[in-house]
Image (tube, rainbow, N blue to C red):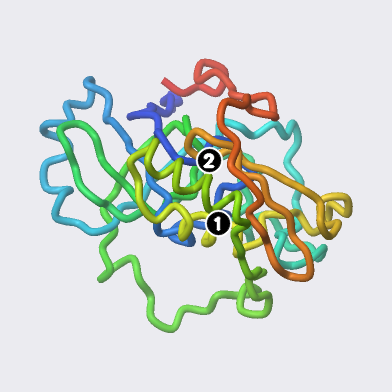
Amino acid sequence: MTAQPLRVIGKLRSCFREKFGTPRQPLLVPGATATLTIAKEFLPEHSLAGLERFSHVWLISYFHLNTNKTVRPKIHPPRLKGESVGLFASRSPHRPSPIGLSLARLVRIEGATIHLAGIDLVDGTPILDVKPYIPEWDSVPGADPGWVKDAPFPSLRVEMSAAAKNDIKAAEKRLNVNGLSAVLTDILSQDLRNPRDRSQMKDGLELGFFFHDFDCHFSVRDGVATVLRLITGTKMHKKERRVSPSKVNLA
């Protein structure tokens, strides 16, 4: 059988600029927004007909920022604090075929563009498909969540410094958005740090992640994440590692 290349229907334009800071699961940050414009070759005026009647959609994506050259049979989910599970018992992005599955809220459709919320994908992610979420089939009451039920998601209390509050007001005005403080709270409350990285877990260490058009600096001490400041005009402090679609057999 002749192999068929995967086709990218569009690239996600997300508020998340890098992996660090992006939620580990969908819908954890309801205010995280993105847009997906369907390529003209897929005739969006026809292929999107009827999708506006659904409240949520599945996004099938390609983890284009993966840099792992080998696939390990066991991984260390952050919430297990160092313990390991089998690769296929996890949602790790480091997989034999780096395909992602995300559930997102469908806000509205304008022409060829789908407006989404509750995103857990970084800006520029290639989207391979969009499917409607149908509760009758996609939700299983009483399903067993496996090891997840024994490993609560890490939680931090979040505070804003006086400087951060001023920066947030300026950012909301500049970006023409509301509720930025609540969104940052949702992001940081889930503890972005990697528990296996001892240097990153040091109390009081200043860390940062890019979001929208600014670099959000924060620190964690005694279970409290404090947003210190928002810095604009800076460059990404991590070199982007984007694999060309031609190298991964994406059309």
Horizontal and vertical percent for residue 175? Answer: 38, 37
Helix, strand or loop at label 2? It is strand
Q: Describe residue 59's horizontal placement relative to residue 48 as left or right.
A: right
Quarter of the view holding residue 60: top left
Q: Amino acid at mark 2?
A: Phe
Tag 2 and tag 1, C-beta contact below 8 Å: yes
Residue 187 marker: 1
Horizontal and vertical percent for residue 135? Answer: 28, 68
Closer to the camera in the image, 173 or 20: 173
Give the residue displayed 44% in from the left and 31% down from the top: 126
Residue 84, visible in the rendered structure:
yes
Closer to the camera in the image, 47 or 37: 37
Q: Which residue is mark 2?
A: 211
Q: Amino acid at mark 1?
A: Ile
**Identity of the residue furthest to the bottom in this view:** 142
Quarter of the view holding residue 98: top right
Q: Describe residue 137's horizontal placement relative to residue 25 as left or right.
A: left
Closer to the camera in the image, 101 or 234: 234
Q: CA distance from mark 2 to mark 1?
A: 10 Å
Quarter of the view holding residue 79: bottom right
Helix, strand or loop at label 1? It is helix
Give the residue displayed 73% in from the left and 46% down from the top: 207
